[in-house]
Amino acid sequence: MRTFKALSALLSYPSRDLQLAVPAIRAALNEGLLPRAAVASLAPLLASLEGDDLYNLQERYVLLFDRSRTLSLNLFEHIHGESRDRGGAMVDLLETYRAGGFDLAGSELPDHLPVLLEFLSTRPAAEARDILADAGHILVALAERLTRREAAYAAVLDALVTFASADPRTEEARALLSETDDNPEDLAALDAVWEEAQVTFAPDPDAGCPVSRDILARMDLSPAPNMQ
């Protein structure tokens, strides 16, 4: 399912490769997995990635996802934090990847949402929906928090919430939504939150920044013949 590869790319750190891949990403999103309204809502993000200054895009991305724990794309951060339970959950997720013939190729953590989406692109739609539904409360919280900040990335999370039929009324979702959003400008508070180094579960932490890789080649997002 190329749609999940496209969504994974959209949630990746902006790079020149990503900007060049936008036409292929746009085509992949039209394979029919998502409702038309969900695809249409992604247009502002696609336009921004394609046309905005790269440094501005990178600054915005870092401000959202790297300097705000409540917007972390590492899913287990929202339910386990730095507890020991996170390590066990990470190992279980790695085993799920390996059982599906999927190996991590960079320094990303297994629970990084773009990594999960890339894995789901190799699985049947029903299995992908079940896995995303298990994380539905986290997806709901991320979508709402991004919407509060009027971030174009909210459309990606909204699309995942729709696909997974995630319910924002569950106890787990309400608990996450009750948390106070981080202030990315409060550096002292952020330093206190992130002072403990994250455990690295990827094969090689020195493998290099994954965003330096060619997105088109990694994601195989060249338009299919019927999408020309």
Image (spheres, rainbow, N blue to C red):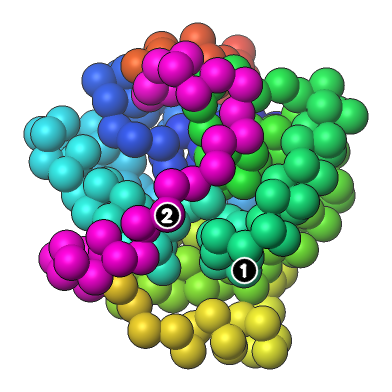
Q: Classify residue 220 as left or right of residue 191.
A: right
Q: Against 165, is 14 above or below?
A: above
Q: Classify residue 218 as left or right of residue 62.
A: right
Give, as a single range, the part of the protein colored magenta: 183-211
Amino acid type for the residue under numbered disc 2: Glu
Q: Give the residue displayed 20% in from the left and 49% down from the top.
A: 60
Q: Give the residue displayed 58% in from the left and 87% down from the top.
A: 175
- How crowded pointer 2 is (Cα within 10 Å; few <14, some 14-19, many 20+) is rated as few
Q: Against 103, is 73 above or below?
A: below
Q: Give the residue displayed 25% in from the left and 20% down from the top.
A: 16
Identify the disc placed on residue 114.
none
Disc 2 target residue: 196
Q: Classify residue 27 as left or right of residue 122.
A: left
Disc 1 target residue: 79
Q: Main secondary structure of the magenta part?
A: loop
x%, y% of residue 27?
49, 29
Give the mark nearest the N terminus, 2 or 1.
1
Q: Classify residue 221 as left or right of residue 79.
A: left
Kindly give the residue lying farthest to the right in the view shown.
Answer: 99
Q: Against 217, is 171 above or below?
A: below
Q: Secondary structure at mark 2?
A: loop
Q: Against 183, is 202 above or below?
A: above
Q: How far apart, in angstroms, are the residues tagged by discs 2 and 1?
A: 16 Å
Q: Give the residue displayed 44% in from the left and 75% down from the top.
A: 144
Q: Secondary structure at mark 1?
A: loop
Closer-to-camera residue (224/221): 221
Closer-to-camera residue (220/33): 220
x%, y% of residue 211?
38, 24
Mark closer to the observer (2, 1): 2
- Residue 84 in view: yes
Amino acid type for the residue under numbered disc 1: Ile
